[in-house]
Image (cartoon, rainbow, N blue to C red):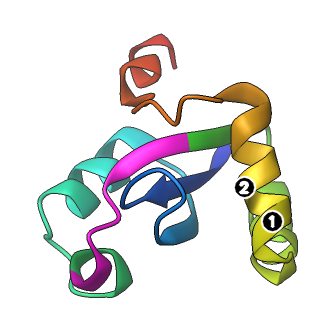
Amino acid sequence: MKGYVYILASRRNGTLYTGVTKDLASRLFEHQNELTPGFTSQYAGKILVWFEEHDLLTSAITREKTIKKWPRQWKLNLIEQSNPDWSDISSHLLDL
């Protein structure tokens, strides 16, 4: 089963949230519509700025745990490598 690691942001250089899921489109919908109480509904992290697909959900979970331990600057660098403008890349989910 595939898995996805993703980072949501409140705005450029704003609050970041790193998560993992097996269904990124559904999980993003939950975040954006505040269907699940928690960090993103409290801090308004609703912009998908980075994600990574893994063939196995267990690999995605391992990667998420690794990224969560990173210093903030490393996460900013990860985002800016593929998304320097911090655009909402949720439209890329149509390709999945």
Residue 16 among those drawn in magenta: no
C-beta proximity under 8 Å, tags 1 and 2: yes
Quadrant where the N terminus is found in the figure: top right
Whether residue 23 is visible: yes
Q: Residue tagged by mark 2?
A: 76
Q: Is residue 50 left or right of residue 37?
A: right
Whether residue 53 is visible: no
Q: Position of residue 19 (x, y in %)?
A: 57, 66
Q: Residue tagged by mark 1?
A: 73
Residue 46 among those drawn in magenta: yes
Residue 19 to residue 91: above or below: below
Q: Identify the image quadrant of residue 35.
A: bottom left
Q: Amino acid at mark 1?
A: Gln
Q: CA distance from mark 1 to mark 2?
A: 5 Å
Q: What residue sits 43% from the left and 24% below the top?
A: 93
Q: Identify the image quadrant of residue 84.
A: top right
Q: What residue sits 63% from the left and 41% below the top?
A: 51
Q: Amino acid at mark 2?
A: Leu
Q: Is residue 83 left or right of residue 96?
A: right
**Circle 1 sits in a helix, a strand or a loop, which is it?**
helix
Q: Is residue 20 left or right of residue 94?
A: right
Q: Is residue 1 left or right of residue 65?
A: left
From which residue to which does the magenta span run? 42-49
Q: What residue sits 80% from the left and 32% below the top?
A: 81
